[in-house]
Amino acid sequence: MKILSASQAIPVHIISGFLGAGKTTLLKHLLQQKPEQEIWAVLMNEFGQIGVDQQLLPQDQGYAVKELLGGCLCCSSQLPMQIALSRLLSEVKPDRLFIEPTGLGHPGQLLEQLTEPHWQSHLNMQALVTVVDGSRLHDRDWTQQNLYADQLKAAHIVVISHTDLMTTADHAALTQLQTEYQPYAQQWLFTEHGQLDIELIKQDYRGSARQIQPLLKQQQITRSADTPVVIQQMPYHYVESAQGYQVAGWKLPKRWQFNFYDLLDLLCEQKDWLRIKGIFNTDQGWKSFNFNPEQFNYQSADEGIDNRVEVIYQQSRDWLAFETALMQCRMEPEK
């Protein structure tokens, strides 16, 4: 009997992707590459109450497939996921684990959960994979959805599926997409019919260069303290760096509401940026903002899990003035 120990942390692959992207097809081909003597396990998450995908995967000896039905394991209560994962590890003792979140999930949040200290001696997280349907890249109504963008940004490896069905418009959209996401330093792979060498995704997860900090105003108050502040909940500010680009972002509690027109004015008056993306709970409803130098796009959005904004830029900036103005857009601010 195998015993799970700190020296035997299991490689774990998150295979994410939007609805219909081809996650299960890719996963099926990856599972076919299992060495005969190993046991591989799969934890699948179905948003509904009836599981279908499990029946599409190998049921042979040496494989263990468990489904978690109802809701999203990424952003609902962590307890069902923790229980299901713990049972899978203790009962099956797999040599490799694959997790397929629902297409409506937020894989970045799942990765944050599984890299918490209590999992680190058991799970060796691999680079997060997001599958993108290449044959739908031309459809901007599809690719501009906030959830689609969240999944793509969370990826360390982007797998473009259905490449055999891509049109000229799809290829042009792919080039634009790769340029747009260049700051995130992702690896892009391509597959037909889900066929991909598993060696290409055997890459240890490397934590982002993201530095989570208190809000800048709070940093001014606590700057004299000798001990660093540990950020455990929103609101917070963060910065990331990759390939000469800088990303400055803020995550704020979902319950905070902002004045839409004040917020729009603030975002429109910013200068020297490459990209501004955000989603906010406003007095006009939930709104998403997707600005590039050629277009200022904003629209109604589904309810988000929090308020957030990111600004991509190449020149160093003092963000205190921006944060101060952002807080002034908040309705009923704290006294």
Image (cartoon, rainbow, N blue to C red):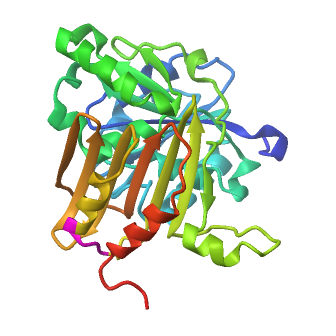
Please give left or right for residue 334 compared with residue 120 in the image: left
Residue 178 locus on image (x, y percent) = 39, 23
Taking depth in this image into account, of 152 and 296 the one nearest to the observer is 296
Q: Is residue 87 visible?
A: no
Taking depth in this image into account, of 237 and 326 the one nearest to the observer is 326
Magenta region includes residue 260: yes
Res 83 → quadrant: bottom right
Q: Residue at x 25, y 15 (%)?
A: 172
Quadrant position of the C terminus in the picture: bottom left
Residue 126 locus on image (x, y percent) = 62, 34
Q: Residue at x 56, y 59 (%)?
A: 82
Placement of 132 over or under 12, stated as above or below: above
Q: Which span of residues is magenta-colored? A: 257-261
Please give left or right for residue 263 compared with residue 123 in the image: left
Placement of 188 over or under 308, stated as above or below: above
Q: Is residue 246 visible?
A: yes
Dominant secondary structure of the residues highlighted in magenta in the image: loop
Res 7 → quadrant: top right
Residue 45 locus on image (x, y percent) = 40, 47
Magenta region includes residue 4: no
| Outermost bottom residue | 335
Residue 219 locus on image (x, y percent) = 63, 70
Please give left or right for residue 118 compared with residue 166 in the image: right
Placement of 223 over or under 239, stated as above or below: below
